[in-house]
Image (cartoon, rainbow, N blue to C red):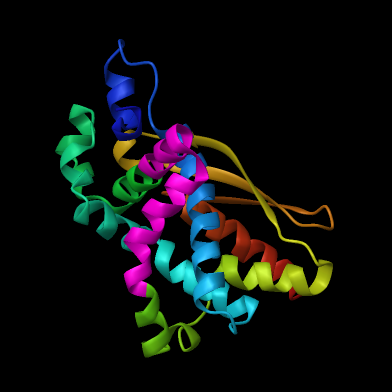
Amino acid sequence: MLALTHSSLANECPRITEHNERLEFLGDAVLELALSTLLFRFFPKAREGELTAMRSKLVNAAALATKARDLGLDALVLLGRGEELQGGRERDSVLSDVFEAVLAAVYVDGGFASAFAVAKGIFEPHLARLQDDGTHRDKPKDNKTRLQEKTLQLFKERPIYQRKASHGPDHARTFEVTLFLPDGREFPGSGTSMKRAEQDAARRALEALTV
């Protein structure tokens, strides 16, 4: 139930003191590890940059929201009245977060083996399509992917993203993050979701590294 509880319901109902944002945070990491493992096994000859690009294609907000709808999570998510009226049940950012929160709940209850089995069942049918169409090599890389490749090249380490705050009404929330480069430099980022905030911070860091 907690994985399906949006913060808008907790904000409107005093009896509800917890919502799914912490689980979404954990689920993001669990999903990244699960998909990294799947791709690593499925594409034994792919280079790191190719694996990163394929993973990004699988875990963007629109793709995860589609998976959430396929699983019927759009009908199960618990929203506050205001978020419901604003169309939150159809919003990709809400549904992608719910998907990650539910995967985190599987991980908390059953461990990584259970979470990996769920992720494998959902995403494995799409891996062959990635291999067949080859589109991941033609599309421009997103900022996070480009920055990770750059920092691995320069510092042999990955950047770190830290969530700082979120503010604004539930239907127009703004998230803020801080990105830490291995050399100690910090870059802020903001956006209408955690993923967009991270992309914004990555863009700023890339600009600094290419000056």
Q: Position of residue 27 (x, y in %)?
A: 47, 44
Q: Position of residue 87 (x, y in %)?
A: 18, 44
Q: Is residue 134 above or below residue 179?
A: below
State which region is magenta: 101-126
196 left or right, relative to 155: left
Report whether residue 174 is seen.
Answer: yes
Q: Position of residue 23 (x, y in %)?
A: 45, 35
Report whether residue 167 is seen.
Answer: no
Indicate the quadrant where residue 73 lies.
Answer: top left
Q: Is residue 74 magenta?
A: no
Q: Residue furthest top?
A: 15
Give 71 or 57, whichever is nearer the viewer: 71
Indicate the quadrant where residue 203 lies.
Answer: bottom right
Indicate the quadrant where residue 156 lies.
Answer: bottom right
Give 46 or 173, whichever is nearer the viewer: 46
Give 200 or 146, whichever is nearer the viewer: 146
182 left or right, relative to 122: right
Q: Is residue 110 magenta?
A: yes
Q: Quadrant of the C terminus?
A: bottom right
Q: Quadrant of the N terminus?
A: top left
Residue at the spot 31% in from the left edge and 45% down from the top edge? 94
Residue at the spot 38% in from the left edge and 27% down from the top edge? 19
151 left or right, relative to 6: right
Q: What's the magenta bit mostly, secondary-structure-wise?
A: helix
Q: Position of residue 140 (x, y in %)?
A: 50, 82
